[in-house]
Amino acid sequence: MEKRRTLGIAALMVTGALAGCGTPESMTEPLVSSFNEASVEIQVGQGDMGFMSQELRTQAIARADAKAVEICARGPNRRAEFASQRRVPINQYVSVTKRLYLCLK
């Protein structure tokens, strides 16, 4: 049991170290989580926004806003309006931020 715990901690440390190697641009790259022509959910960056600097957080939100506008424009409802934001846990230690936009006429 102790060996398994040690391996788990080591794996977590390696993952964290690799995540730290990303460029600021890759950390703020928005990802589309879902789209149904009435709304689009954008995952902001590749990790918890709480660990980003204010400048990177502002860039991440601006990129998410632009991505939402781009995605909503593909459907019949052309305008994206920010509705909410939430943190979604991936595991015990990591969560991501998702922003929901409504696609309006």
Image (cartoon, rainbow, N blue to C red):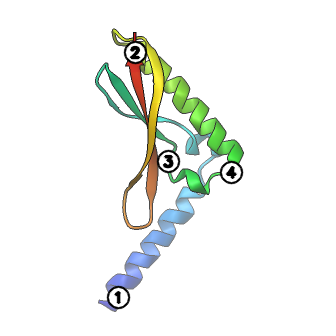
Q: Position of residue 24 (x, y in %)?
A: 64, 45
Task: Classify residue 37 by image quadrant.
Answer: top left
Note whether 73 is above or below 29 in the view shown: above
Q: Which of 4 and 101 is in front in this view?
A: 101
**Alpha-carbon neighbours of circle 2 within 10 Å: few (<14), some, or many (≥20)?**
some
Tell us which disc is closer to us: 3 or 2. Answer: 2
Which residue in the protein does label 3 denote?
A: 46
Residue type of the residue flagged with mark 1: Lys
Q: In percent of the image, x 43 and y 46: which residue is there?
A: 86
Counting labels gives 4
Q: Where is residue 73 in the image (x, y as percent from the top left)?
A: 43, 13
Mark 3: which secondary structure? loop
Residue type of the residue flagged with mark 2: Leu
Tell us which disc is closer to us: 4 or 1. Answer: 4
Task: In the rendered structure, find residue 3 and report the number of the disc placed on it.
Answer: 1
Tell us which disc is closer to us: 1 or 2. Answer: 2
Q: Do the residues labelled 4 and 1 touch (CB within 8 Å)?
A: no
Which residue in the protein does label 2 denote?
A: 104
Which residue in the protein does label 4 denote?
A: 53
Task: Measure the alpha-carbon separation of dots 4 and 1.
Answer: 36 Å
